[in-house]
Image (tube, grey):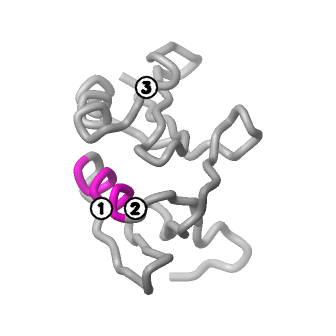
Amino acid sequence: MNVHEKINYIEFPSKDLTKTKEFFRAVFGWDFEDYGPEYVAFSDQGVDGGFFLSDRVCSTESGSALIVFYSNALEDTQAKVEAAGGNIVRATFSFPGGRRFHFSDPNGNEYAVWSDN
C-alpha cells in the first residue's frame, strides 16, 4: 500500500548486480526482480527498493544516509555478512538502547545492523 508522503522506495548504487543479489540473498534472504541489465528491484523488506548499476558507493564517510537493519541475533547476522563476502567497517559497539555494527557489501556500500538484546 502506498502511503501519502511517506518513504516508499529506496535505490542504491551497485558496481556488480550479480554480487549484490548473491550477497543479499545469502545474508537476508531477499528475492529480486531484474529490470534489464542495469537495474534490479527488491520488495517486502520493510521498504521496497532497488539497485542501479553505478561505480559510486554509499558510505557515512561521504555523507550518505545509513540504512540500518534490525537483528534478533547480532552475532549470527554478523557471521552471515562475513560469510557472504561483506566487510565489517565498524566493530560492534553499544549505544543507548542496544548494540550495532557497520558493514559494507561486496560493492562497498555501507549499512548497519542493530539489536536491542
In this rendered view, identify the residue nearer to me: 37 or 60.
37
* Image position of 11 (left or right of 113): right
In this rendered view, identify the residue nearer to me: 71 or 58.
58
The residue to which callout 3 is attached is: 88
Task: Say what amino acid the circle numbered 1 marks.
Answer: Trp
* Label 3 or label 1, whichever comes before in sequence order: 1
Residue located at (62% from left, 78% from top): 3
Residue located at (50% from left, 35% from top): 112
Extreme residue in the bottom direction: 36
- Tag 3–tag 1 contact (CB < 8 Å): no
Query: In the rendering, at what x and y percent does residue 10 appear?
Result: 59, 65
The residue to which callout 1 is attached is: 30
Within 10 Å of disc 2 (Cα), the crowding (few <14, some 14-19, many 20+) is: few
The residue to which callout 2 is attached is: 45
In magenta, the rendered stretch is 18-26
- The alpha-carbon separation of the residues under discs 2 and 1 comes to 8 Å
* Image position of 34 (left or right of 53): left
* Image position of 93 (left or right of 55): left
- The alpha-carbon separation of the residues under discs 2 and 3 comes to 22 Å
